[in-house]
Amino acid sequence: MGLHFKELVVKQEISIADLRGKVLAVDAMNMLYQFLTTIRGPEGLALTDANGHVTSHLIGLFSRTTALMEAGLKLVFVFDGKAPELKQKTWEKRTGVKENAALKYEEAKEVGNLEEMKKFGSRTAVLTREMREEAQHLIRALGLPIVQAPSEGEAQTAYMVKMGRAYASISQDYDNLIFGCPRLIRNLSIDGKRKKTGKLGYQIVKPEQILLEEVLTHLHLSQDQLITLAILVGTDYNPGGVRGIGPKTGLKLVKEYSEHQLPALFDKVEWAKYFPEVGWQEIFDTIKYIPVTDSFTLEWKQVDEKEVYQLLVEKHNFSVDRVKGKMEKLREANRLLAQKGLGAFF
């Protein structure tokens, strides 16, 4: 969803070392889209192999995942299941946005405007079923567990943290908070920088931890009020939110009405005028009661180097030396972790 909660949340910087040995539930789709939009060539297009197949998602996934494994983090990747029916309209809107971005890209290309090409090129990113399956292939080859969510992946990661099956959820979006995630970690990158989406250059980033309890205490809100605020500002189920209502205005409105006065609140903001086809209560219930599952096993296995080579080197033309070097580093990192008693991956 990408909720606009940045100015409202309480956060604290942490280090990668703080997470060593901890189980972290990764919002896989969020991470893969991040790689697809940021790992691009000089003209703004996704990187490809010799046969023209997109590899940006695999390049980012392999690089970041192995680096985090070397640092002693125990990753589990959670993939989306069946999206709520309400999300279908969002997808239709995003398709239109991508088509428009593709046209803008071609216009920029005609006049040789590289900055515009990068900006609009990143907005055309599409994660296909084949890309998703290849990402899962690589994750399994690296010996890491995968959890299939029955619905939204971020809701499943939130549930895993609530149940103590994971220490934190890893995502760039704040959506995990409205699904009740106790601990969210953003900017999980070893190199301490992130490529600017659609732009040239990088920006310095540091991992940050967001605790739901601290956010609710700071804002003086209940969990249900936080969900209400999200709906006012805009979710995947009502993109853009109510016109004219940003985070601060939304927060003020939520505090003016009790949890038993929500119908009056949504009448005041003229909900039916802006979203005549969907009721706020339906969105609220979709978020609060979204399906999650306990049917998964977390098991870290030996890295299957042969599978890694076949997928990356033989199929997608990755550098042999690069992949070999990463495999050697992983073996050494696991040996050191085992010696320190932090728990080996395999």
Image (cartoon, helix red, strand yellow):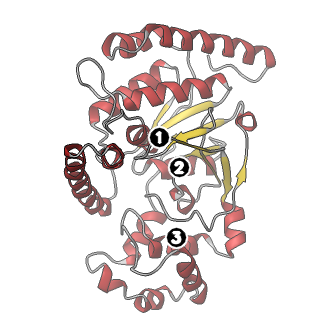
Left or right, 8 with reference to 304: right
Please identify, in this view, whether the residue under mark 2 or under mark 3 is nearer the observer: 2
Say if mark 1 contacts mark 2, CB within 8 Å: yes
Which amino acid, by three-letter code, is at mark 1?
Met
Q: Earlier in the sequence, mark 2 or mark 3?
A: 2
Could you give the CA–CA distance between mark 1 and mark 2, rounded to whole angstroms?
8 Å
Q: Identify residue for label 1.
A: 31
Depth check, front residue: 158 or 269: 269
Which amino acid, by three-letter code, is at mark 2?
Gln
Say if mark 1 contacts mark 3, CB within 8 Å: no
Could you give the CA–CA distance between mark 2 and mark 3, rounded to whole angstroms?
18 Å
Number of residue marks: 3
Where 215 sits versus 25, above or below? below
Disc 2 element: loop
Q: Position of residue 257 (x, y in %)?
A: 56, 88
Q: Residues within 10 Å of mark 1 (few under 14, many from 20)?
A: some
User: Which residue corresponds to the image point at 47% horizontal and 40% vertical from the top-left?
Assistant: 31
Q: Residues within 10 Å of mark 2 (few under 14, many from 20)?
A: some
Which amino acid, by three-letter code, is at mark 3?
Ile
User: Which residue corresponds to the image point at 31% horizontal and 81% vertical from the top-left?
Assistant: 274
Left or right, 346 with reference to 86: right
Q: Identify residue for label 2.
A: 172
